[in-house]
Amino acid sequence: MNAAPPRRSVLVLGLDPGLRHTGWGLIESDGSRLRHLGDGVVSTIDTDEMATRLRTLHDGLAKLLAELRPDEAAVEHTYMNKNPQSAIKLGMARGVVLLAPALTGIPVAEYQAMEVKRSVVGHGHADKIQVQDMVRRLLPGAVLKRADAADALAVAICHAHHRSSRVALARGYVPA
């Protein structure tokens, strides 16, 4: 009789793009079990030129990726900003956030904010406080010093949940 292959945990890096502060959160996903491994932000200086800020963001993410060595990354889609200049700046930062893990060969998934909220809280119209409370419950020990990092952990949790569903379906599991 063939034994099932041992289940391997996956390190998921969630990223919440921002030009001023890009949040990151690293979790370990082993089936339905999640474990908080770290979180924080990569920050830029408001008064620096745009190219310098984007380079700072890239270099910070590249260093983080080299240290943490995640298996997969997940990035939250950003809402359109009413201010066109802010939207363009955020779009440039988001491009760097998507590119950094892709350059290292790490698969990058993207999730809408409502999808992240639905996955973490149970409905897509949850507020930030509800999301942060559920992140704390799902990841005991996570302190959540910054909202950007909490959002990034929520993205990582969302990806872990979606990933588990895809793996189960690939193995032929059909819920009753």
Image: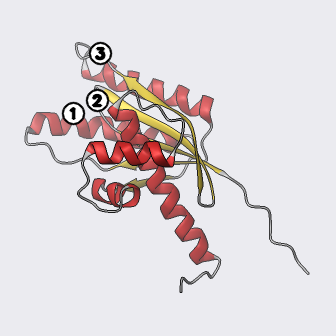
Residue at 63% across / 82% down in the picture? Answer: 172
Q: Are marks 1 and 2 in contact (CB under 8 Å)?
A: yes
Mark 3 lies on residue: 45
Amino acid type at circle 2 is Leu
Rate crowding at label 3 as few (under 14), some (14 to 19) or many (20 or more) other CA atoms within 10 Å. Answer: few
Q: Secondary structure at mark 1?
A: helix
Q: Secondary structure at mark 2?
A: loop
Viewer-side label of 1, 2: 2
Residue 100 position in % (x across, y down): 47, 37
Q: Secondary structure at mark 3?
A: loop
Residue at 48% across / 63% down in the picture? Answer: 162
Residue 60 position in % (x across, y down): 46, 24
Res 6 → quadrant: bottom right
- Circle nearer the N terminus (3, 1): 3
Residue 74 appears anywhere in the view? no
In front: 60, or 104?
60
In screen coordinates, is 142 left or right of 23? right
Tell me how far mark 2 sits from mark 3, CA to CA.
9 Å
Mark 2 lies on residue: 19
In screen coordinates, is 121 left or right of 89? right
Viewer-side label of 3, 1: 3
Q: Which mark is residue 89?
A: 1
- Circle nearer the N terminus (1, 2): 2
Residue 6 appears anywhere in the view? yes
Tell me how far mark 1 sits from mark 2, CA to CA.
7 Å
In front: 108, or 170?
170
Q: Are marks 2 and 3 in contact (CB under 8 Å)?
A: no
Rate crowding at label 2 as few (under 14), some (14 to 19) or many (20 or more) other CA atoms within 10 Å. Answer: many
Residue 17 position in % (x across, y down): 33, 38
- Circle nearer the N terminus (2, 3): 2
In screen coordinates, is 176 left or right of 10? left
Amino acid type at circle 3 is Ile
